[in-house]
Amino acid sequence: MTGRLLVDTGPIVAKLLESDEYHEACVDQLRKIRGPLLTCWPVITEAAWLLRSYPQAILRLLSSFDGRPFEIEPLGAGDLPAIAAILAKYKSLGLQLADASLLHLANREGIDLIFTLDRRDFGVVRLAKGKKPRLIP
């Protein structure tokens, strides 16, 4: 699989924790991906919080942003209104900041492929012009 794709919290946590039920599936998927794996600070923050009982995993997380496997897409003050609009649009879903930020990046960067374990939220949300994101695995 080639091309740019966005990575959600779940696959990052699963990659770093061998005890995670999705570890093998996510590691296998990562082997198949040839393009850049893009994410953002809200996703990293969410992953660090989920890994808070695993200090070594947090260290591995923070050292995995040297261009491979993950790259951080910047979000600035100018992105906040669009992220807030996504949160408001999906208020009844209870969409989290990390998911809204990824959805915004998908729209901003023209990326429709998202590596996520969160089918509940990403199976419902839509990109600009009503397009459904493509989800892996």
Image (spheres, rainbow, N blue to C red):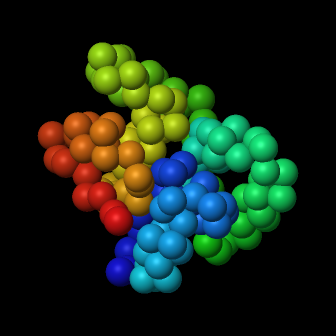
Measuring from the top left, give residue 93's x and y in whole percent: 32, 23
Residue at left 23%, top 37%?
A: 124
- Rendered position, 56 above or below 85: below
Residue at left 48%, top 68%?
A: 26
The total of numbered circles placed on residues is 0
- Rendered position, 33 above or below 120: below
- Please give left or right for residue 23 compared with residue 116 in the image: right
Q: Residue furthest left?
A: 130
Measuring from the top left, give residue 13's x and y in whole percent: 60, 55
Residue 102 in view here: yes
- Rendered position, 57 above or below 87: below
Using the rendered view, name the quadrant where residue 43 is placed.
Answer: top right
- Work out which quarter of the rendered image holds the C terminus and state it: bottom left
Measuring from the top left, give residue 49's x and y in whole percent: 70, 38
**Relative depth, front residue between 10 and 77:** 10
Residue 6 in view here: no
**Relative depth, front residue between 24 and 133:** 24
- Work out which quarter of the rendered image holds the N terminus and state it: bottom left
- Please give left or right for residue 102 compared with residue 133 in the image: right
**Relative depth, front residue between 133 and 80:** 133
- Please give left or right for residue 73 compared with residue 55 in the image: left
**Relative depth, front residue between 103 and 30:** 30
Measuring from the top left, give residue 28's x and y in whole percent: 47, 78
- Please give left or right for residue 101 compared with residue 112 in the image: right
Residue at left 19%, top 48%?
A: 132
